[in-house]
Image (cartoon, grey):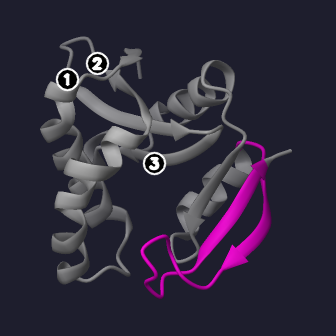
Amino acid sequence: MKGNIGAVQEHDFDTLTGLWEASVRATHTFLKETDIVWLRPRIRNHYLIHVELHAFRDEHHAILGFVGVANAKIEMLFIAPQAQGKGIGKQLLQYAIHHMKAVELDVNEQNPDAVGFYQHQGFEIVGRSPLDGQGQPFPLLHMRLK
């Protein structure tokens, strides 16, 4: 899909949070409603401010996906459900690798489509944690660019 990738401003955080929620609801079927409700304000008010953010915008300037990187690690990569499978994730991932120097990421083990996507893009599993970053029982696979 054609569009451009550019930096995100704080005034975009509500849009990013809504996109995050829609994406998670479409792809993270292992999460319960209470998990999403608990995470949403943390995404909006804490996590977004701790990463360098870049978004994919379509020709109408609508944000269809975003990536967040900190310390050469992709901390978040989310695509709007209606835009999934159109190459936006690949474009954002390549942008993160080439422009933001990202070489690592964690992915939920219970999200096999995402694991496969990252493996197809050149990442390999280098470790596993039984808990996620919030200490919840959602195992993470640690991946590194080959």
User: Which disc number belongs to residue 146?
Assistant: none
Contact (Cβ within 8 Å) of mark 2 with mark 1: yes
User: What is the three-letter code of the residue carrying label 3?
Assistant: Met
Towards the viewer: 48 or 5: 48
Residue position marked by numbered label 3 in the rendering: 76
When the figure is inspected, residue 29 is found, relative to residue 89, above or below; the finding is below
Whole-percent x, y for residue 132 in the image: 50, 75
Residue position marked by numbered label 2 in the rendering: 58
Residue plotted at (68% across, 21% down): 98
Between the C-alphas of marks 3 and 1, the distance is: 19 Å
Name the front one of labels 3 and 1. Answer: 3
Res 143 quadrant in image: bottom right
142 magenta-colored: yes
Q: Residues within 10 Å of mark 2 (few under 14, many from 20)?
A: some
User: What is the three-letter code of the residue carrying label 2?
Assistant: Asp
Q: Which residues are magenta?
A: 121-144
Residue position marked by numbered label 1 in the rendering: 62
Q: Is residue 119 left or right of residue 131?
A: right
User: What is the three-letter code of the residue carrying label 1?
Assistant: Ala
Residue plotted at (37% across, 18% down): 7
